[in-house]
Image: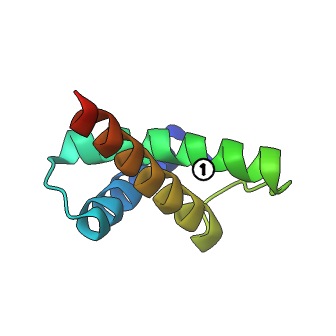
């Protein structure tokens, strides 16, 4: 998947995670959260569940979304402690 595909997946996953987690961010933050969430979700899926996802698909978006939600949850825990 090219860089444009990662950006599209990242923005959509970040935006969906923002809505589900009840946060309010901008477009750039959604992109960063979505892409980092996709990497986190892909790493967890590959390491723990032996799931390999490539290309633009609904499964890729789902993994990115779940990773973005996990990232926002973990950031919320860290923020509360500080």
Total labels: the figure holds: 1
Residue at (41%, 43%) from the top-left corner? 74
Q: Indicate the colouring scheme.
A: rainbow
Residue 24 placed where, x, y %?
Answer: 13, 54
The residue indicated by pointer 1 is 41
Dot 1: within a 10 Å radius of its alpha carbon, few (fewer than 14), some, or many (20 or more) residues?
Answer: many
Residue at (81%, 57%) from the top-left corner? 51
Farthest residue, direction front: 81
Query: In the rendered view, does 70 fall on the left or right side of 44?
Result: left
Query: In the rendered view, does 45 fall on the left or right side of 61?
Result: right
Query: In the rendered view, does 39 fall on the left or right side of 19?
Result: right
**Quadrant of the image occupied by residue 75:** top left
The answer to whether residue 65 is seen in the rendering is yes
Residue 65 placed where, x, y %?
Answer: 47, 61
Q: Is residue 78 above or below residue 20?
A: above
Farthest residue, direction top: 82
Q: Is residue 16 above or below residue 67?
A: below
Identify which residue, 49 or 13, lies in the foreground. 49
Residue at (43%, 52%) from the top-left corner? 68
Disc 1 secondary structure class: helix
Residue 46 placed where, x, y %?
Answer: 78, 48
The answer to whether residue 9 is seen in the rendering is no
Query: Where is the C terminus found, in terms of image quarters?
Result: top left
Residue 25 placed where, x, y %?
Answer: 15, 49
**Quadrant of the image occupied by residue 2:** top right
Query: In the rendered view, does 37 fall on the left or right side of 27?
Result: right
């Amino acid at each position: 998947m090219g860089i444009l595909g990662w950006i599209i997946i990242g923005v959509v996953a970040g935006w969906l995670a923002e809505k589900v987690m009840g946060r309010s961010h901008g477009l750039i933050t959604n992109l960063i959260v979505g892409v980092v969430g996709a990497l986190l979700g892909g790493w967890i899926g590959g390491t723990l569940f032996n799931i390999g996802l490539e290309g633009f698909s609904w499964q890729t978006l789902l993994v990115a979304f779940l990773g973005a939600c996990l990232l926002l949850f973990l950031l919320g825990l860290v923020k509360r402690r500080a």
